[in-house]
Image (cartoon, rainbow, N blue to C red):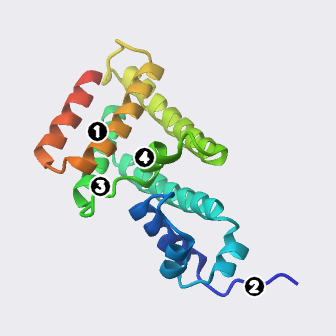
């Protein structure tokens, strides 16, 4: 008979995510996870598998949360270019509210682990495909609306925007001056107009 989990899985994932976000995957020990979640090692292994499996669940949970937040943000847009502006405004606010300068867990994962583990590479590739499709559709729509220029294809602009978001999130770890960050966003957006 399988054991029944007697803990709040969502809360445990949040606590584990906080540890991974603060320390990174490689610097996080199983003892760190035990301390943060108040679960013993065997409970963590039985419920989540390995440390890597737990990390992947944390990444997916983090991704799900951000997809919801991003969707809610972009739903407020009047047109495609406005949706892109709101997306960058969302990330700007995330950077400014990150008092610990931890950055984005997924962006941090790219720099720490993108070339180390197949399951991580698969997750990151899937995440990139999702955002590339979202951005490409926004650009196509903006080009049809004539709010985004046609100097580049929608795919080329989607690649540019995806790369810009990654760079912006990384830059935001070191630069927290609102005016400087707004200048970066303005420059990115002006490329599309």
Label 4: which secondary element: helix
Neighbours of disc 1 within 10 Å: few (<14), some (14-19), many (20+): some
Sequence-wise, the earlier of marks 2 and 3 is: 2
Q: Earlier in the sequence, mark 2 or mark 1?
A: 2
Q: How many marks?
A: 4
Name the residue tied to disc 3.
94
Judging from the image, what secondary structure is the residue with disc 2 in? loop
Residue at numbered disc 4: 107
Which badge, 1 or 3, is on the more N-terminal residue?
1
Residue at the extreme bottom of the image, as rendered: 6
Residue to which mark 2 is pinned: 4
* CB contact under 8 Å: marks 2 and 3: no
Q: Are marks 2 and 4 in contact (CB under 8 Å)?
A: no
Say if 12 sits above or below 26 in the image: below
What percent of the width, then of the height, locates residue 40?
62, 84
Q: How far apart are the two marked residues, 1 and 4, measured between alpha carbons?
A: 20 Å
Gap in Å between the C-alphas at discs 4 and 3?
13 Å
- Identify the residue under disc 1: 85
* 90 shown above or below 78: below
Along the horizontal axis of the image, is 50 left or right of 137? right
Tell me the mark number nearer the camera, choosing from 1 and 4: 4
The answer for how far apart the CA atoms under marks 1 and 3 are is 14 Å
Figure check: 120 above or below 53: above
Q: Indicate which disc residue 38 carries.
A: none
For the residues carrying marks 1 and 3, which lies nearer the camera in this image? Answer: 3
Picture residue at 56% right of the left edge, 36% below the top: 129
């Amino acid at each position: 008979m399988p054991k029944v989990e007697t803990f709040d899985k969502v809360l445990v994932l949040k606590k584990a995510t906080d540890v991974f976000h603060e320390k990174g995957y490689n610097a996080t020990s199983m003892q760190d996870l035990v301390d943060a979640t108040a679960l013993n090692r065997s409970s963590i292994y039985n419920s989540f598998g390995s440390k890597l499996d737990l990390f992947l669940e944390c990444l997916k949970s983090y991704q799900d949360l951000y997809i919801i937040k991003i969707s809610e943000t972009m739903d407020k847009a009047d047109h495609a270019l406005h949706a892109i502006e709101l997306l960058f405004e969302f990330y700007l606010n995330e950077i400014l509210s990150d008092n610990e300068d931890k950055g984005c867990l997924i962006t941090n994962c790219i720099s720490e682990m993108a070339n180390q583990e197949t399951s991580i590479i698969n997750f990151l590739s899937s995440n990139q495909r999702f955002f590339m499709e979202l951005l490409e559709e926004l650009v196509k729509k903006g080009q049809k609306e004539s709010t985004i220029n046609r100097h580049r294809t929608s795919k080329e602009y989607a690649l540019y925007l995806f790369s810009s978001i990654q760079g912006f999130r990384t830059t935001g770890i070191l630069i927290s001056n609102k005016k400087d960050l707004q200048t970066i966003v303005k420059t990115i957006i002006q490329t599309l107009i």
